[in-house]
Image (cartoon, rainbow, N blue to C red):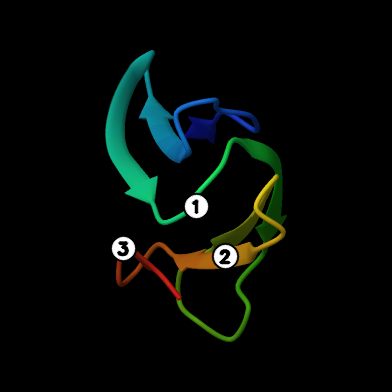
Amino acid sequence: MSSSPASADKTVRLWMKYKPIRTFSGHREAVRGLALIANAGFPNASFASCSNDGCVLRAIRQFGAFR
């Protein structure tokens, strides 16, 4: 799996074999960075994204939603 660290459409997409399999939304402006968080106390990895809106959002793959 891979993802795109920047997106002008305010989303983060999770990709597998060159196809998007999940889109995460929640930012109000362009996404500029992405950091993977290995395990983070959960069975699956999660990630945090930052945006021009000044927010950092965390997604947990197990639950599939931003927090």
- Helix, strand or loop at label 3? It is loop
Answer yes or no: do the residues labelled 3 and 1 have beta carbons within 8 Å?
no
Answer yes or no: do the residues labelled 2 and 1 have beta carbons within 8 Å?
yes
The residues bearing labels 2 and 1 have C-alpha atoms spaced at a distance of: 8 Å
**Quadrant in which residue 41 is drawn:** bottom right
Q: In the rendered structure, which amino acid carries the disc numbered 1?
A: His
Viewer-proximal residue among 51 and 41:
51
- Locate residue 16 relative to residue 39 in the image: left or right: left
Dot placed on the residue nearer the N-terminal end, 3 or 2: 2
- Helix, strand or loop at label 2? It is strand
Q: In the rendered structure, which amino acid carries the disc numbered 3?
A: Gly
Q: Which mark is residue 64?
A: 3
**Which one is in front in this view, the residue at disc 3 or the one at disc 2?**
2
Dot placed on the residue nearer the N-terminal end, 3 or 1: 1
- Locate residue 6 relative to residue 13 in the image: left or right: right
Horizontal and vertical percent position of residue 62: 34, 69
Q: Residue at x 38, y 13 (%)?
A: 18
- Helix, strand or loop at label 1? It is loop
Q: Residue at x 59, y 59 (%)?
A: 47
- Give the residue number, with chain letter if any, for mark 1: 27
Establish if 33 lies above or below 64: above
Dot placed on the residue nearer the N-terminal end, 2 or 1: 1
On-image quarter of the C terminus? bottom left
- Give the residue number, with chain letter if any, for mark 2: 57
Establish if 32 lies above or below 38: above
Answer yes or no: do the residues labelled 3 and 2 have beta carbons within 8 Å?
no
Q: Residue at x 65, y 53 (%)?
A: 53
